[in-house]
């Protein structure tokens, strides 16, 4: 079945890839993946990432190797220390010309709700090379490797810091970010009353 849809109903994490031909692949995982999915991964020389998109925003931080990703209509070269960002519903693919190692982060669709906007509405730059982001991503890698107590909380805190840095300095569209979305909501309620 090219449109086969399977899901583990006991799982709480889900992510769906849509392909150019209209087919979909649905992934599901356990509660430890919530609200974001972090992983250290690699691809062998010659492997492919078929053209696909998803509602989630995806980060890939390259730890080793070089590759070219096709994101939308752009072909971008990525090297060790680069962060690749695929925005929500942005078509992307790759053919790995050499072995690569990377951190893969699939952001929960509601990750920035407390900031007062949806992350799926942000257009991040697709390639980021920034020493502050590199430091955060290397800390995420160390935390993934160590697997210490409360690591999920630290991973999500580091990801939140990274997203704030990216919002401030690496977006392709202007986003109005309220300083305190909760305070804005209280103010709105007071005005209505």
Image: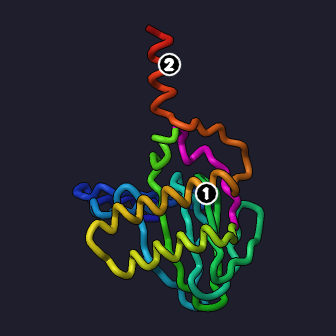
Task: Tell me the residue at 39%/75% (across/down).
Answer: 143
The mark nearer the N terminus, 2 or 1, is 1
Range drawn in magenta = 116-127
Q: Is residue 10 left or right of residue 54?
A: left
Task: Tell me the residue at 63%/57% (across/down).
Answer: 166
> Which quadrant does the N terminus fall into?
bottom left
Inspect this view and state whether residue 78 appears: yes
- SS at circle 2: helix
> Which quadrant does the C terminus fall into?
top left
Q: CA distance from mark 2 to mark 1?
A: 28 Å
Give the label on residue 188, or none.
2
Inspect this view and state whether residue 18 appears: no
Which image quarter: residue 53? bottom right
Residue 132: percent from the left, percent from the top?
Answer: 62, 68
Residue 80: percent from the left, percent from the top?
Answer: 64, 83
Front residue of this view, candidates 193 and 105: 193
Task: Tell me the residue at 49%/56% (across/down).
Answer: 160
Q: Residue furthest right?
A: 74
Which image quarter: residue 128? bottom right
Residue 151: percent from the left, percent from the top?
Answer: 33, 68
Which residue is tagged 1?
Answer: 165
When the figure is inspected, residue 117 is found, relative to residue 6, above or below; the finding is above
Residue 104: percent from the left, percent from the top?
Answer: 50, 71
Which image quarter: residue 65? bottom right
Q: Is residue 118 magenta?
A: yes
Front residue of this view, candidates 23 and 162: 162
């Amino acid at each position: 079945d090219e449109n086969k849809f399977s899901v583990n109903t006991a799982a709480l994490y889900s992510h769906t890839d849509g392909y150019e031909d209209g087919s979909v692949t649905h992934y599901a995982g356990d509660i430890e993946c919530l609200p974001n999915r972090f992983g250290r991964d690699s691809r062998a020389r010659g492997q492919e990432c078929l053209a696909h998109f998803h509602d989630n925003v995806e980060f890939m931080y390259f730890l080793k190797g070089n590759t070219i990703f096709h994101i939308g209509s752009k072909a971008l070269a990525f090297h060790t220390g680069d962060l690749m960002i695929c925005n929500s519903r942005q078509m992307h693919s790759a053919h790995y010309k050499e072995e690569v190692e990377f951190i893969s982060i699939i952001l929960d669709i509601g990750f920035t709700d407390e900031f007062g906007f949806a992350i799926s509405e942000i257009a991040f730059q697709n390639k980021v090379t920034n020493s502050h982001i590199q430091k955060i991503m290397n800390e995420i890698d160390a935390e993934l490797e160590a697997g210490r107590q409360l690591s999920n909380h630290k991973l999500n805190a580091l990801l939140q810091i990274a997203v704030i840095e990216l919002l401030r300095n690496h977006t392709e569209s202007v986003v109005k970010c309220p300083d305190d979305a909760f305070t804005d909501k209280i103010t709105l309620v007071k005005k209505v009353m």
